[in-house]
Every structure is written in structure tokens, then in C-alpha cells.
Image (cartoon, rainbow, N blue to C red):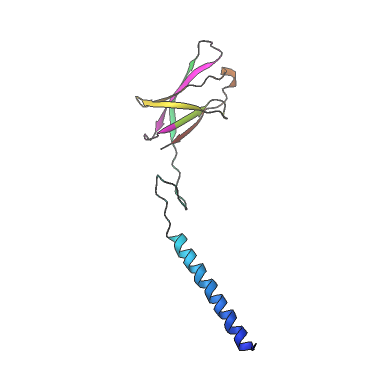
Amino acid sequence: MSKTRKTIRRLVAVAVVAVVAMAAFGFAAANTVPATDAGDGSAAISGYTVSAVTYTLGANPQNLANVKFQLAPAGATSVQASVTGAAPYAACTGPVAGAWTCNVTDAVTAATSLRVIAAQ
């Protein structure tokens, strides 16, 4: 095989790889991430502000019965909370009059931090 033929084959191979790479890049660049759906890409994660936190003791005052708090901005549809800073998280109900209620039943002495997970 001549040197010219080898050079032409190499150029054709490089051209094919370049076309495939550009097509893949163009497809990936066309993806967008809507604010409320999953997809390939990125978007800002908005945070919530937790305020007006109140704890209610259970029938046994060594245990908690629930924790109530408000989230801002409004719009969360799924909320969970933990007073131990770790799993398991208690499902919360609400908002009622702007407050979410989470039935945590941990011992008062185990309550070291309030962690809230909220999603729209």
C-alpha cells in the first residue's frame, strides 16, 4: 500500500471521528433542565427557611411528640424532619395555617439538631 493511500485512510478516519464527536456534542448541548423535572444538565437548588420552630412533649415528658415549623417560601409538597440529625426522618403533614407538623417520637436527650428535607 502506498504512503498516499495510508494518509488518505487516516484523514478519512479522523474526519469520521470528528463528525461523530460534533454530532454528540450538538445533541448534548441541546438538552435543557426544566425547573421541576429531572434531566441531563444543571439548575440552581433553591433553599427553604425554617422558622417558628416549636416542640411538643409526649405523654411521657422524656419523649417528644412532634415538632412544628414554618417553611418559606411556600410551595413545598413533601417534607420530612429529624431531630437527631440523622435517619430515620419523620414524614410531615401540612401546611396548616402555614405550619408543618412532624411526628417525631425521639427521646428529648437524643434531640441534638433539627434537619428538614423539603421538596416541591
Look at the image and tell me whether residue 23 can be seen: yes
Of the 4 image quadrants, the one containing the N terminus is bottom right
Q: Quadrant of the C terminus?
A: top left
State left or right for residue 75 relative to residue 89: left
State the residue in front, 94 or 114. 94
Residue in view at x 56 percent, y 13 percent: 62
Residue 47 in picture, x, y percent from top left:
45, 39
Residue 30's place in the image compared with 50, above or below, is below
- Magenta-drawn stretch contains 91: no
Q: Measured from the top left, where is residue 79 in percent x and y?
A: 45, 31
Q: Residue at x 48, y 21 (%)?
A: 103
Residue 53 visible in the shown view: no
- Residue 60 belongs to magenta span: yes
User: Height in image: 62 above or below 96?
Assistant: above
User: Closest to the observer: 52 or 12?
Assistant: 12
Residue at the location (51% across, 21% down)? 104
The relative height of residue 88 versus residue 16 in the rendered view (above or below) is: above
From the top left corner, tell me how far across and down residue 117 is, in percent: 48, 33
Q: Which residues are magenta?
A: 59-78
Residue 12, image x, y percentages: 55, 79
